[in-house]
Image (tube, rainbow, N blue to C red):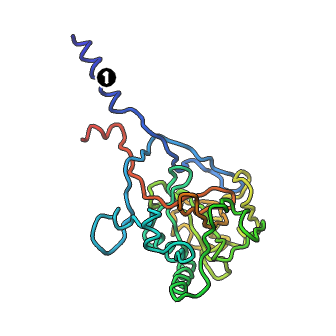
Amino acid sequence: MIVSHIFLLSACLLSVFTVTSFSAITLTNVKTFSNQNPSRSTSNRIKMVSDVGSEISGGGGSSAEKSDYLYNPQKRDEYYGDGSARNVAKYLVDLHDAKATFDFCGGMMFQLVLTKQLRNHLAQLSEAQQQQKDKKVELFDASKGRMFQIPGYEKSSFADNIRIFHGREVRKFTDAAGGMGFALQLSMANDSDPEGWTSGEISDYDGWGHDVGRTWRNGERLEKEGFQTYRNQFGKDAFGLHHRCYLHLDGNNRIWLSAEDGCEGTPGPQKAKQWGWLDAFKM
């Protein structure tokens, strides 16, 4: 009788703690950053159980309701316009201000971060578009799913802050929205942005190739090269890789922020973490 009760209790516990999903998490043991590519690992510690909208100040309703137009393509177009009237510059500024996240590689949540200079530049472009001036951020159609497919493409470090942007993939970012320590920072492509690409990043850029063999930089190196506030902004352990980025649509009217090597993400709400198995006893 006792044995049968133990068997039934064990079966119940197994049914409670069954693993239901897996997703990628941040790296923990990168010891060198030059000419080394961290692998993208997976873990069963994150479960995509419910959407948690980014908090946006003002207005009533839940945070998910207030941020839905950032992530839902139909509501996005109702708010920012569609086709040639879509105000992409304003959309990027609002994503940044809301600490919104992009879903890369099926579950790697990257916070979008604009440098101060690029945010100001995009705000000016947004205002110019509202005044029906020509200059605006370009959003390519679904046929331009890779950067080499856009008109005038060339292998270089060139960026114009409208069609192509300078970006950095940041890992181990302290307090990153999305809970995974990831960010994608876009900067102004000129010599005056103190957070922009360093001369070293510009000279060794080869972002059309695979991450393997490319130069990953930690905070100490970036600060020596000129980005003096890197660790202050992202944390003492932060490191990353620089990419050129652009924006394109897909067949479902979703917007993708894509790196030159083809890695890309689409705006998506932050995901709730799964409880650890011991936390089940706290219910």
- Residue 242 pos. (x, y %): 65, 64
Q: Residue at x 45, y 64 (%)?
A: 74
Q: Residue at x 52, y 89 (%)?
A: 131
Q: Secondary structure at mark 1?
A: helix
- Residue 139 pos. (x, y %): 60, 70
In which quadrant is the N terminus drawn? top left
Q: 10 Å neighbourhood of mark 1: few (<14), some, or many (≥20)?
A: few
Is residue 33 found left or right of 121 in the rendered image?
Answer: right
**Which residue does the numbered mark 1 point to in the structure image?**
10
Q: Quadrant of residue 185?
A: bottom right
Q: Nearer the viewer, residue 274 or 30?
A: 274
Q: Residue at x 60, y 61 (%)?
A: 169
Vertical side of 109 occupied by 60: above or below: below
Amino acid on which disc 1 is placed: Ser
Residue 66 in view here = yes
- Residue 119 pos. (x, y %): 53, 78
Q: Quadrant of residue 200?
A: bottom right
Vertical side of 81 occupied by 204: above or below: above
**Hey, which residue is sitting farthest left in the picture?**
1
Q: Residue at x 58, y 63 (%)?
A: 249
Q: Quadrant of residue 222?
A: bottom right
Is residue 29 found left or right of 59 in the rendered image?
Answer: right
Vertical side of 19 occupied by 205: above or below: below
Q: Nearer the viewer, residue 225 or 267?
A: 267
Residue 217 in view here = no
- Residue 246 pos. (x, y %): 63, 67
Vertical side of 32 occupied by 83: above or below: below
Total marks shown come to 1
Q: Nearer the viewer, residue 182 or 156?
A: 156
In which quadrant is the C terminus drawn? top left
